[in-house]
Image (cartoon, grey):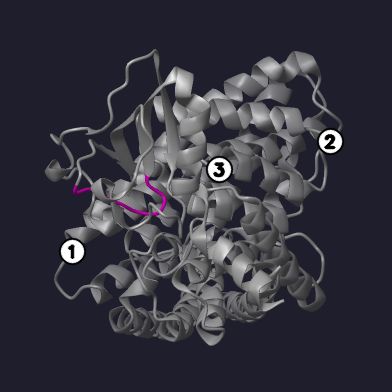
Amino acid sequence: MELVIKGALVGIAAGAVVCAYRLTLQQAEKLLQLILSYAAAQPLVALAWFVGLLSIAAAISFLMVWEPYTISSGIPQTQADIAGHYDLPWHRVLFAKFIEGSLGALAGLSLGREGPSVQLGGVAGKAVAKLTRAKRGEEHLLVTCGAASGMAAAFHAPFTGVIFALEEMHKVFSAPLICALMASAAAADFLVSEVLGVKPVLDVHFASNLPHIDYGLVLLMGILLGVIAAIHNQGMFFAQDCYRAITRGAPFTRILIPCLTVGLVGLYLPYGPYLLGGGEKLFELLLDPHTQPLTLLIALLVAKYILTALCFGSSAPGGTLLPLVIMGALAGAIFGRVVTGITGESYSYIANYTALGIAGLFAGVVRAPITGVVLVFELTGSFSSLLSAVLISIVSYIIADILNIDAFYEHLYTKMLGTANRDDMADHAALGNSILGEKIIRSFVIATGSTAAYTQIKNITWPDAMRIVAVERAGNELIAEGQTQLEPQDRIIVLMDEQAEVRIQASLKDLCLIDKSLTESRDECLASR
């Protein structure tokens, strides 16, 4: 009960911060459009604008140096804070990220508000934890609540925030945590709805259900989206590597490149203003996609991707989730145009494929299929195509995984922690007890605040008839040894005796999944009565 109340407080705090952030971004985007309209007709205004972009790049760079935890989207940093790797200074991150994101929106960087909103929500949760003197494990849970609230407030989708926090960040499902997350996300969404209205961020609608005969086309679309997702991730990672080679004058020189590029695109490229920012303006073209030339939709998809990669690779503060959603919608609209043109079906079905494109590309890029499906449900407000959304998410996820390209945020998290391709993660002896009977393999995720978290394997009393054969950490697999310290979000691979499975699983649940901060809060509550 206490955690749920604190979760609601976090939701109010995070909702207030993200609400102010969204209002600031709206004004920045309006000012940008006004500047572009004048600069397009007056060369002196255009020259002054490029000087302004130079100043914006300098200001963003200064803040990135002043508070390095604010670079890029902020989601990996928040995840690292939840896992206990980082201890984000919430006041500095809150100030710097808010200003950086607002300046990026004014410049027109092809980045979204969702990543920064997650980080802003996370540090709002951390502020509540510090002010209420929460214990370490509970603090991590409140940061998770803040991240969920930030996502909910950014997309106006509370359940998406809850699922994203569980599926992508915390990676452990427990009833007390889910209740706290729901209270937090609901409080944030209510506050944002009161200030900004209940209109969804993107106006997505399903037509009537797709005929079952078209589900073969849904499978085909899922395959194509899985390939596009792999290309998306590989290109984004490549852009990061290219920018890392720029060391002279960094980070200013890195930030200056996308700032000047979006200035040129916005002023001189046809449909340039549609490509700037997160992409809401671009989505307006998809309200009647059958009226737009197919070649235009393809060109806009390619241009949006290149511009987003150029901005993201520089580590400019801003998210990629909204551009990803827009690219998924574009890909779906293109597929729908081709299908309806070949089959002669009603153009109204293009809206279905547009929404399915969002779910499919999200699942393939982030590898969070449940979040993608829930997001589409909340954006459309309809269960009409739930089955097709689930199907396309599964297929896209599998294809992207088969192509062996890292999940987007998992790769960023791994790179940030410096754990990618470490040679010292292998060639260790397995640890555990002898197993005499038939053997089976199970896996368990180490929860934040559990007994096993931050403890060396040799110092944990494990049940008999089991052996830990590997530990998966941030996308890497290491063979366990006694000195290996388990960390939150690690996944341990356990070989166990089939006859003792029930007993072993119960013991491992107590060690790995039961969050001590939750039970401690409950016990303290009971003791005070």
Residue at the spot 41% in from the left edge and 66% down from the top edge: 81
Q: Amino acid at mark 3?
A: Phe
Q: Secondary structure at mark 3?
A: helix
Q: Is residue 441 magenta?
A: no
Q: Which residue is mark 3?
A: 362
Q: Which x, y percent locates residue 490?
A: 37, 46
Q: Amino acid at mark 1?
A: Ile
The N terminus: image quadrant: bottom right
Q: What is the span of residues highlighted in magenta in the rendered image?
A: 483-490
Please give the residue where the numbered disc 1 appears in the rendered image: 246
Given the image, on which type of amino acid does mark 2 rest? Ala
- Label ID, residue 207: 2
Q: Earlier in the sequence, mark 3 or mark 2?
A: 2
Q: Residues within 10 Å of mark 3 (few under 14, many from 20)?
A: many
Mark 1 residue element: loop
Relative to 509, say whether 1 is above or below: below
| Mark 1 vs mark 2, CA separation in Å | 48 Å
Which of 75 and 279 lies nearest the eye of the viewer?
A: 75
Residue 151: percent from left, percent from top = 61, 62
Question: Picture coordinates of residue 138 (x, y %)?
Answer: 52, 69
Q: Residues within 10 Å of mark 1 (few under 14, many from 20)?
A: few
Left or right: residue 439 compared with residue 5 = left
Can residue 251 be seen here? The reply is yes
